[in-house]
Image: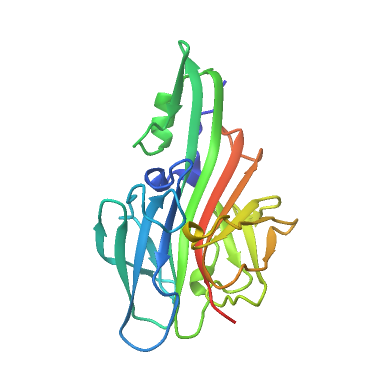
Amino acid sequence: MLNKTPFKPFLVAALVLGSVAVQAHRAWIVPQETVLSGENRWVSFDAAVSNDIFLANYNPGRFSDVQVLNPDGSAGQVENLHTGKYRSVFDLALKQEGTYRLFIASSGLRALWEEDGQRRMYPGRGEQYSAEGFAKAVPENAEKLVVSQASRRMETFVTLGAPSRNALAASGQGLELVAVTHPNDLFAGEEASFRFLIDGEAAQGADVTLIREGTRYRNAQEAITLKTNSKGEITVRWNGAGRYFLEAEYKDNKAQKPATERSGSYVAVLEVLPD
């Protein structure tokens, strides 16, 4: 019998990324600059769901729920959000020195089953997960029931002045990147290391792909593909300077009941500067 005990870690979660992380398309948030200096500085961001890396050509996504962590760890907010036909744009005022983290994160359960020969799913399109909704929608002893525990995170980083790490602390939920090498201290001639955690533990065996911008102007994507080691770590040797789309995927069978499988997806945009 299906255990319908509330899934506490996800009670506060919203499936925010459901509107922007479309299967077979890529969602991203690209800062126009990642390392700045001076006073009264602002950064503008482009965000979209696209067929190509950083080329807005599919839909503008929904980025009204972008969160900001200021360098001192307090919450900030973006301004001047505008949604066009293919992309969203917004600004961030840099009022503190140090590193800012902008992100969208979500987690929840998704149930698939069959009923009267028809495939059913909870939550449906446009719905948000809740323990109450799950208990109401998913039948006891549903046929061919698969319950998945999934998390998604998309983020980027901007630094004013010297890099700092208060905003980089892991939350302990879902698939996350821990910056062994600071994400705003990346150079084309240097290696960089990152660690991935799933619910606070090393994500061993996660598949990581990095693609440098400009794929429209070259014949091959020149993707860097890596797999995390027993510590959840990778070491990257860059394909030159530029902005990179980083995507990581993880899956195991260590889900909390009633889920039977756990998965996490993670996306970041990083900028690698010339030597």
Answer whether residue 2 is visible to the viewer in this image: no
Q: Is residue 50 above or below residue 121?
A: below
Residue located at (57% from left, 55% from top): 221
Q: How is the image coloured?
A: rainbow
Task: Identify the image quadrant of residue 145.
Answer: top right
Residue located at (43% from left, 46% from top): 21
Where is residue 85? Give x, y as percent: 26, 51
Q: Nearer the viewer, residue 235 or 122?
A: 235
Task: Identify the image quadrant of residue 44.
Answer: bottom left
Residue located at (52% from left, 75% from top): 184
Q: Is residue 151 left or right of residue 84?
A: right
Q: Residue furthest bottom?
A: 38
Q: Is residue 142 left or right of residue 131?
A: right
Q: Residue furthest right?
A: 230
Q: Is residue 155 above or below residue 136?
A: below
Q: Quadrant of the C terminus?
A: bottom right
Where is residue 263? Give x, y as percent: 58, 43
Where is residue 98? Give x, y as percent: 46, 80
Q: Quadrant of the N terminus?
A: top right
Where is residue 42? Give x, y as percent: 32, 77
